[in-house]
Amino acid sequence: MYHGRCPDRRCGVSPENATIAQKTARYVLIGALVLAGAWMLRHFIPALCWAVVLAIATSSFYERWLAKFRGRRRDVWAALTFTVIIGAVLVVPLVYGGIVAGREAISLGREFAASAASGPPPLPAWLQQIPSLSRWEHEFWAQYLGPGAGSGGGRVHAAPAVIEWTRIVGVQVARRLVTLAFTLLTLFFVFLNRDRLSIQVPQMFRRLFGSSVDRLLRRVVLAIRAAVDGIVFVAVGEGAIMCGVYALAHAPHPILSGVITGVFATIPFAAPIVFGTVAVVLVAQGSIGAAIVVAAAGTLVLFVADHFVRPVIIGEGAKLPFLWALLAILGGVESFGLVGIFIGPALLAALLSLWRGWVEELPADGG
């Protein structure tokens, strides 16, 4: 009777005695399975990446949080409550910003509806001297309000471009909400199984690549934490500076606008959406000079923060030179989206660690 053991040495070989062909076939099989699994989960990879990033970034906070719990189910309750806290930190500002944006959109829509019959609002006198700008304003108005704007009892008919743009935005928002939900779900299980993962993941990499991979893993973790620090510190700084600029420019709701600017500053090159909107509002109120000051100050702060301050913070934490830190941020965002701001520095930190390891292992030239 077969008991799960090989009765003859010819029916199998131990890993130590495996031939090169067998080892090659085994690694090819592992690679094929990994690729198949990645393809199957391709739509959930962003959520998995975000969960790993958040788990690494908040690991020290979670350790202190876990120490507050006692009992047999302490791991479950600690993971659940900490995940809920992170979810609240991420969701509450988005919901509040969405409510504010909805109110502003309704107000803006009413203004458009009130002025649709009379055409676009007049430009300032000094801008009316530029014929091309005045013509562009009328073309833009006709395109996005439609040729029937103001007809039919004062009803405004949205142009197809506006309808299509609204549909695209709705689809993207739905996708981001689904990604956020799966990120929090994955994060809960990462916290719940953090002890086993902290042992099993390094062991897997050591078995594949040897003990020298430990230094590479440490560099990756440091790079992710440095990226989080760079995002948070820079966002808080940008929000505080622009809050002062909004107050000096007498913009409406300067503190709220500054907070929203800080939230958007966590996304590379997204802050112009906020201070650009504030500048447009100031122009509509007739404060052309204040609008120019807000736009210029916002552009300057954004340029310095994203191209100098953030790369320096991330570069020092990830042990990356300034140029490589800047390229890691820009290239990561370009290749992987928002999560690329963490993947980019981690990837280049790993490559730089490999490079330094190889260089250090080279024998010295005896001349």
Image: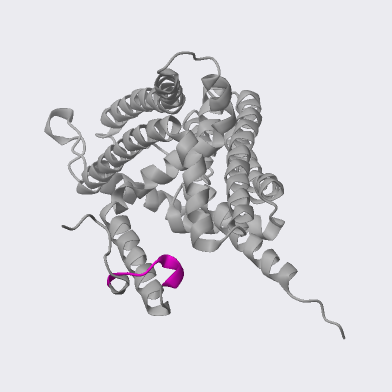
Relative to 263, is 267 above or below?
below
Answer yes or no: is residue 129 visible. no
Q: Position of residue 142 (x, y in %)?
A: 27, 47
- In the shown orientation, is residue 274 left or right of residue 118? right
Q: For the view shown, which residue lies furthest in the right direction?
A: 367
Extent of the magenta region: 11-17
Q: Quadrant of the N terminus?
A: bottom left
Q: For the view shown, which residue lies furthest in the left direction?
A: 152
Is residue 16 rendered magenta in the image?
yes
Relative to 263, is 319 above or below?
below
- Figure quadrant of residue 180: top left
Q: Across the whole image, how many numbered discs are drawn on residues?
A: 0
The residue closer to the viewer here, 46 or 239, is 46
Query: What's the coloring here?
Result: one colour
Answer yes or no: is residue 9 visible. yes
Q: Position of residue 218 (x, y in %)?
A: 62, 49
- Figure quadrant of residue 224: top right
- In the shown orientation, is residue 356 left or right of residue 125? right
- In the shown orientation, is residue 316 left or right of residue 247? right
Relative to 151, is 309 above or below?
below
Name the residue rendered at 65%, 44% in the picture. Answer: 305
Name the residue rendered at 38%, 79% in the picture. Answer: 21
Is residue 320 rendered magenta in the image?
no
The residue closer to the viewer here, 313 or 220, is 220
Q: Position of residue 357 (x, y in %)?
A: 68, 65
Name the residue rendered at 46%, 41% in the picture. Answer: 197
Q: Quadrant of the C terminus?
A: bottom right
Q: Position of residue 92 (x, y in %)?
A: 42, 22
Name the residue rendered at 70%, 65% in the picture. Answer: 356
Relative to 359, is 339 above or below?
above
